[in-house]
Image: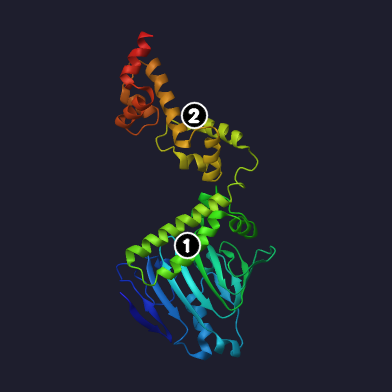
């Protein structure tokens, strides 16, 4: 579907049905209560059909979220020009846009009635200056990353520019980074020096070029893969910052102790361990790799060790109960894992232990 729309002089193309998203450009300005689409949707809007005397004000009203653009003088308003192609999904959004020079104040999501997001972008043309919460300004030029965090107030200034940006849920990024996102200047430095950062830039620009002509399923795939690449890139770029006060060996010892304490919980897995440790996934996995094992293997070994102890010490306990108390969801998966590691079934192990 490629429907034309025009609202108060704003014209563009949009491509979704009411079943995919109840909101459409024909309605009032989007707000948090209207939700996000069930599947990623695409729309393309520009100032071309807007009255020259009110282009910028209409653009501010239609497209700016978590951003309070500064007013323009009448000459700058008449000369203002912009176009945005948006791929909107839940929880990520991809925007490819060009615009005349703008500046303004970034607003917290709670103030702007918006979702808490974190923007990772690439400058294609122009220059951007960003200052968050009174910190030193961060300048992004052609080819550089830029960032925007709508949790707090900030100040943004663009020259005439073209850019591509990906918005991800802030909670998703926090989770991947162990609960703490570095300040923008530090995160930008880490991304720029990362090999994966180069791949992310290339993929963002490629995805932005493909979305207009892609099919719905292709758009959904592109957006999901791009979001995962961005989260992974941030995670690997910042892994040196995670658990900086503990050497990998110390982290490994602490993690093993935590596994022992929680091994009877079937839901305790690598993700739960990372959340408890408060470090990035990459840092946690590296600590286990340096110890010659993996997180999943260590958890499985701890469960098998717990099961062996119960099989030997409680000869009358049903095998199914042993499985449950050592953290397995069901007896079948326990039996398979036990045989794979011990070369015999749990019942056979119990018999050998009794004879010994």
The image quadrant that residue 340 belongs to is top left
Q: Nearer the viewer, residue 341 or 134?
A: 341
Q: Position of residue 205 (x, y in %)?
A: 48, 67
Element at badge 1? Answer: helix
- Name the one closer to the observer, 272 or 210: 210
Give the image location of residue 85, x and y in percent: 44, 74
Relative horizontal placement of residue 218, taking residue 299 as reference (left or right): left
Judged left or right of residue 126, residue 16 is left
- For the C terminus, the image quarter is top left
Q: Earlier in the sequence, mark 2 or mark 1?
A: 1
Q: Residues within 10 Å of mark 1 (few under 14, many from 20)?
A: some
Judged by depth in the image, the label closer to the viewer, 2 or 1, is 1
The residue that appears at 60% across and 84% down in the rendered structure is 72
Q: How many C-alpha atoms fall within 10 Å of the one at disc 2: few (<14), some, or many (≥20)?
A: some
Which residue is identified by label 1?
A: 203
**Secondary structure at numbered mark 2:** helix
Q: Residue at x 31, y 29 (%)?
A: 331
Q: Position of residue 283 (x, y in %)?
A: 56, 43
- Residue 309 x/y as whole percent: 42, 19
Q: Is residue 66 something one can see in this rendering?
A: yes
Q: Are marks 2 and 1 in contact (CB under 8 Å)?
A: no
Give the tally of numbered discs. Answer: 2
Disc 2 target residue: 260
Residue 115 makes an appearance in the image: no
From what the image shows, is residue 348 above or below residue 290? above
154 left or right, relative to 25: right
CA distance for labels 2 and 1: 41 Å
**202 shown above or below 354:** below
Comparing 112 with 158, the one in front is: 158
Q: Which mark is residue 89?
A: none
- Residue found at the very far top of the displayed protein: 355
């Amino acid at each position: 579907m490629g429907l034309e729309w025009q609202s108060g002089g704003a014209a563009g193309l949009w491509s979704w049905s009411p079943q995919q998203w109840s909101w459409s450009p024909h309605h009032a300005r989007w707000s948090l209560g209207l939700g996000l689409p069930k599947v990623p949707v695409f729309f393309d809007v520009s100032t071309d059909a807007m009255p020259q005397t009110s282009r910028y004000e209409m653009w501010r009203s239609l497209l700016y979220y978590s951003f309070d653009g500064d007013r323009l003088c009448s000459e700058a308003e008449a000369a203002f020009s912009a176009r945005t192609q948006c791929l909107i999904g839940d929880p990520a959004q991809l925007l490819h846009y060009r615009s005349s020079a703008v500046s303004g104040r970034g607003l917290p999501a709670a103030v702007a009635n918006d979702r808490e997001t974190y923007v990772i972008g690439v400058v294609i043309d122009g220059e951007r200056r960003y200052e968050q919460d009174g910190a030193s300004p961060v300048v992004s030029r052609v080819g550089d990353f830029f960032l925007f965090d709508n949790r707090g107030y900030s100040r943004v200034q663009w020259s005439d520019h073209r850019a591509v940006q990906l918005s991800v849920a802030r909670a998703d990024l926090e989770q991947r980074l162990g609960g703490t996102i570095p300040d923008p200047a530090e995160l930008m430095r880490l991304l720029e020096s990362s090999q994966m950062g180069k791949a992310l830039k290339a993929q963002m620009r490629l995805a932005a070029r493909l979305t207009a002509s892609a099919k719905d399923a292709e758009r959904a795939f592109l957006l999901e893969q791009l979001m995962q690449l961005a989260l992974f890139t941030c995670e690997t770029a910042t892994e040196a910052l995670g658990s900086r006060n503990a050497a990998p060996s110390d982290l490994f010892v602490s993690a093993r102790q935590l596994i022992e304490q929680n091994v009877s919980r079937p839901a305790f897995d690598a993700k739960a361990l990372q959340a408890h440790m408060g470090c990035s996934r990459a840092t946690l996995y590296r600590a286990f790799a340096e110890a010659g094992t993996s997180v999943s293997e260590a958890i499985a070994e701890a469960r098998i060790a717990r099961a062996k102890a119960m099989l030997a010490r409680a000869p009358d306990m049903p095998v199914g109960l042993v499985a449950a108390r050592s953290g397995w969801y069901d007896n079948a998966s326990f039996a398979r894992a036990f045989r794979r590691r011990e070369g015999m079934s749990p019942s056979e192990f119990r018999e050998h232990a009794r004879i010994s």
